[in-house]
Amino acid sequence: MPEAFESIYHVTGKDFTNAGKVSTSIKDTLKRLGINPAIMRRIAIVSYEAEMNLVMYAVRGTISLSVSLEDISLMVKDEGPGIPDVSLAMQEGYSTATPEMREMGFGAGMGLPNIRKNSDEFELSSEVGRGTQLHIRVLQAA
Ligand SMILES: Nc1ncnc2c1ncn2[C@@H]1O[C@H](COP(=O)(O)OP(=O)(O)O)[C@@H](O)[C@H]1O
Ligand SMILES: [Mg+2]
């Protein structure tokens, strides 16, 4: 495994055709880097949920992956409506998904709770009318 690996991915809001491609690409990259499967699975969940939130709720954004010997981190930044009440959004089952999104199988309101559950460090900040920023870290086994 190299000392460090970094990559940045772009995600477009409402682009359901390409939704999921970034998290698939991240998963492939981690596999190629030989990351432990249990850690890979946690990052796969986090990146998929973050990507889908970006597609569903934001206008556009980026997901930056950074791998070191100590940890894997994801910085997810979007331009979008922001989250008016972050602690409400963090509650299991809370969702503002539209009926169309629910028809596609989204809107269980478990994305953010599962992101937190699968992260060793979790920071979510948001500014209404501007966008949302999520930073997570998963520690590599010592
Ligand atoms: N990037 C984002 N921009 C704006 N709102 C968001 C974003 N991510 C999440 N939210 C808000 O937080 C709620 C909960 O998100 P989540 O737990 O992933 O559930 P779900 O995606 O099923 O609605 C969403 O319904 C939405 O209102
Ligand atoms: Mg979600």
Image (spheres, rainbow, N blue to C red):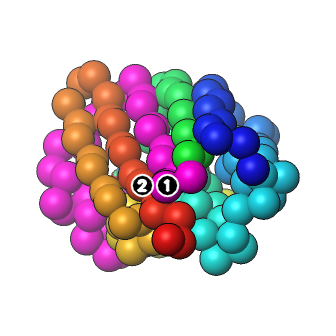
Please determine whether, in this image, residue 58 is positioned above or below residue 115: above
Q: Give the range drawn in magenta.
A: 69-96
Indicate whether residue 70 is drawn in magenta.
yes
Indicate whether residue 53 is drawn in magenta.
no
Where is residue 120? Give x, y as percent. 37, 66
Side of 61 where 18 appears, left or right: right
Please state which of the two labelled residues, at mark 2 or mark 1, is closer to the viewer. 1
Please determine whether, in this image, residue 122 is positioned above or below residue 15: below
Compute the Cα span from label 2 to label 1: 7 Å
Identify the image quadrant of residue 105.
bottom right
Which residue has dot 2 on it?
A: 137
- What element does badge 1 sit on? strand
Where is residue 97? Give x, y as percent. 44, 55
Q: Is residue 53 visible?
A: no
Where is residue 54? Give x, y as percent. 50, 40
- What element does badge 2 sit on? strand
Where is residue 41? Give x, y as percent. 65, 70
Which residue has dot 1 on it?
A: 71
Report the amino acid beneath label 1: Asp
Residue, x 54% and y 34% (percent of image)? 64
Tell me: is circle 1 under 8 Å from ligand 1: no
Report the amino acid beneath label 2: Arg
Q: Can residue 123 be seen in this view?
A: yes
Please determine whether, in this image, residue 61 is positioned above or below residue 71: above
Label drawn at residue 61: none
**Are discs 2 and 1 less than 8 Å apart at CB?**
yes
Identify the image quadrant of residue 79.
top left
